Image (cartoon, rainbow, N blue to C red):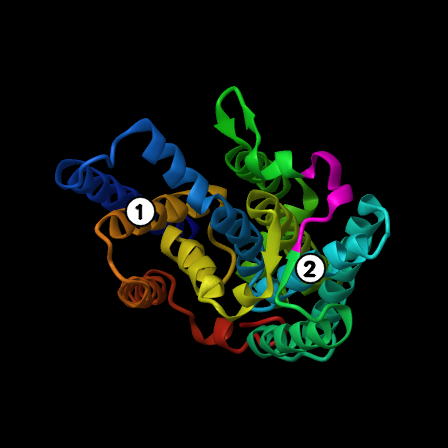
Amino acid sequence: MKIAARRAKLTQEGIVFALAVVLFVAFAVSLHGFVTSGNIVALIRSVSILGMLGLGMGLVVIGRGIDLAMIATMVVAVSWAFSLAQAGMGFGYALLIGAGFVILVGCITGILVAFAEVPAIFTTLAMGLAVYGVGRAYFFKIDVQNVPDNAGAFSFLGVGHVFGVPMPIIAFAVLAVIVWLLLRWTRFGRFVYAMGDNLLAARVAGIPVALLIIAQYVVSGLIAYAAGLVMAASVASMSTRIYNSTMIYDVLLVVVLGGVSLSGGRGNVRSILVGTLLVGVLLDGMTIMDVSYTEQNLVKSIVLLLALVTDSLINPRDEQTAQQQQGDI
């Protein structure tokens, strides 16, 4: 069964990668300027934030969860940190407070899922609404928080280059390596796969499932926070309107499209990179063709639906799996 699952996973990744190549060649032939070095760099840079968020979401989904509060946590934590810095607090301390807020939200989410046994999809949906509401009511009043003047070299994270490579791309690559090492070579990663594959068996085997669930939501939140900082550094501000955008669905599209199974226990960093590649090529091509924002969302919705159907066919849930409720999506 494990060998068959691996083959299925690799087949899905192969199909998605092949589709990305086909789209790339088609756009290169039909669209003027698509294959220029500037456009290729811009393409990778444009999806680097989405890829970073996909790494956090993928980690949770592998562990048989989901984090719909990711965008709200990112927006509120970064905006609050900027607001505190603008009010006179040291920028480094403000960033630490933002990180502390992210950790608190992750702990509360994990506790509700692990101990109260509230399904993760409902827990994180409600947490997202609560976090955003608290942020707008008590932490800041305006939609856009600018990077404070005392930010120092913070802007380099978004607009700087190293050997000609934009920093957002480097940040995405570094984070991908860190998550790969975390999942591949640490006990935490092995436990996440075991929990996602069979929650009851993981608990019987002595894996601290409850603490692991809390930890994965904390890690996911911190990854989202890092992505938010890179995003803010790129445009010198953080807009809270992002929470009301389709970004959370784009993140799910990257994760599921690449082959990270919603049934848990399957997928890796390579899956997320492949999904990010296809989404990047698709969005860049539609942008050059001047496809409207509404039509782009329609295309992404159809692709996401197809990815979900494919996941359900490749990774069906058996009766025993379906009965596992704690931490389940």
Q: Residue at x 67, y 41 (%)?
A: 186
> Dot 2: within a 10 Å radius of its alpha carbon, few (fewer than 14), some, or many (20 or more) residues?
many
For residue 252, above or below residue 229 = below
Residue 298, percent from left and from top: 28, 68
Specify whether 120 is left or right of 321: right
Image: 206 above or below 25: below
**What is the x, y in percent for residue 66?**
55, 66
Q: Nearer the viewer, residue 158 or 64?
A: 158
Front residue of 207/20: it is 20
The picture quadrant where one finds residue 70 is: bottom right
Give 216 or 102, whichever is nearer the viewer.
102
Residue 263 in view of the camera? no
- Rounded to the nearest angstrom, the CA distance separating label 2 from label 1 is 28 Å
**Percent x, y of residue 84:** 80, 57
Q: Secondary structure at mark 2?
A: helix
Disc 1, SS: helix
The circle on residue 79 is 2
Q: In the image, residue 148 lies at what x, y percent?
A: 73, 48
Residue at 33% x, 27% y: name it. Answer: 37
Query: Of tags 2 and 1, which is closer to the observer?
Result: 2
Write the residue at 26% across / 66% down. Answer: 295
Q: Amino acid at mark 2?
A: Ser
* Residue position marked by numbered label 1 in the rendering: 284
Q: Which residues are magenta?
A: 146-154
Q: Does residue 205 appear to the left or right of 19 in the view shown?
A: right
- Which is nearer the N-term, disc 2 or disc 1? 2
Name the residue type under label 1: Asp
Residue in front for this viewpoint, 143 or 208: 143
Residue 309 seen: yes
Disc 1 crowd rating (10 Å Cα; few below 14, some 14-19, many 20+) is: many
* Residue sitting at the far front: 149
